[in-house]
Amino acid sequence: MMDKVLRLENSFEVEVEEDAVVHVQLGWDMKRGGLKEKIEGQVAAAVIGISEKGYDLNLAAIVEHDTQEAELVFHHGPGGCGADRSGAVLLSKDDRSGFGGGSDEDLHVRLKEVPESVQRIVFFMNIGGANVLDQHLTDVDNVFVQIQNEKNCRVYLREEEAFCCERAQEYCCYTFAELCRKGRGWVLHGVSRYSKEDSELETMRAFCDR
């Protein structure tokens, strides 16, 4: 039986310009199948929130403060968007199709507007409701995450292999990076944390209870 959490060593580290707008992207391709199956999956997801004919991939962030409780930026509410209290960390609308080209969900961090109390921002993705439907990362086609400077398009990190390797067959959540404050600037660290958490709140609890 696989562990609920698998942490791998990751030595990736890069300094990030202190005035950068960090653009975090999550992309995937919609499940192969006929038009009828795809429509059925979209209807089921709209009615009950999940569907065995589709995959609800979600991008999220945990904003950690040194003076107050951590914040979770995730899809919730009627609009499906999310943001921290300051508005410096903003998540795009929820996309459950994987139909578009390039990234399907995006998260922007305007570093100049991040409160001084914030010491770390953790980025992760999951498949919502995966444990009910027995879905795993390797079930989804062409998943990738990318982090870049939106101003000059400098790519800090891109990860694809993590979602199609053998170990990903057992997990539905992957934490891939963290932005850490360093003096007056920021450093981006790679993180390789696989887990079986299929809700953002569950991952938030796992990080905050450590």
Image: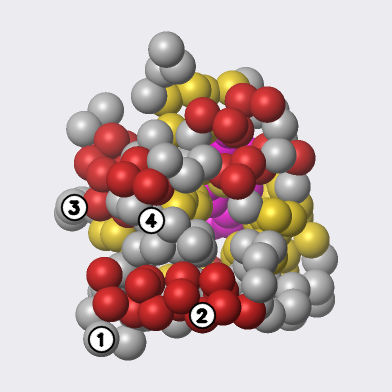
Question: Which picture quadrant has residue 37?
Answer: bottom right
Q: Residue furthest top?
A: 1
Q: Which residue is mark 3?
A: 69
Q: Nearer the viewer, mark 1 or mark 3?
A: 1
Say what amino acid the circle numbered 2 marks.
Answer: Ile
Q: Identify the residue shown where x is 23% and y is 80%.
A: 77
Q: Which residue is mark 2?
A: 39
Q: Identify the residue shown where x is 60% and y is 46%.
A: 139
Q: Residue furthest bottom?
A: 79
Alpha carbon of mark 2 to alpha carbon of mark 4: how far? 19 Å
Alpha carbon of mark 2 to alpha carbon of mark 3: how far? 41 Å
Quarter of the figure that contains the C terminus: top left
Q: Nearer the viewer, mark 2 or mark 4?
A: 2
In the displayed structure, does residue 74 sit left or right of residue 100? left
In the displayed structure, does residue 48 sit left or right of residue 151? left
As helix, strand or loop, the secondary structure at mark 3 comes to loop
Alpha carbon of mark 1 to alpha carbon of mark 2: how far? 22 Å
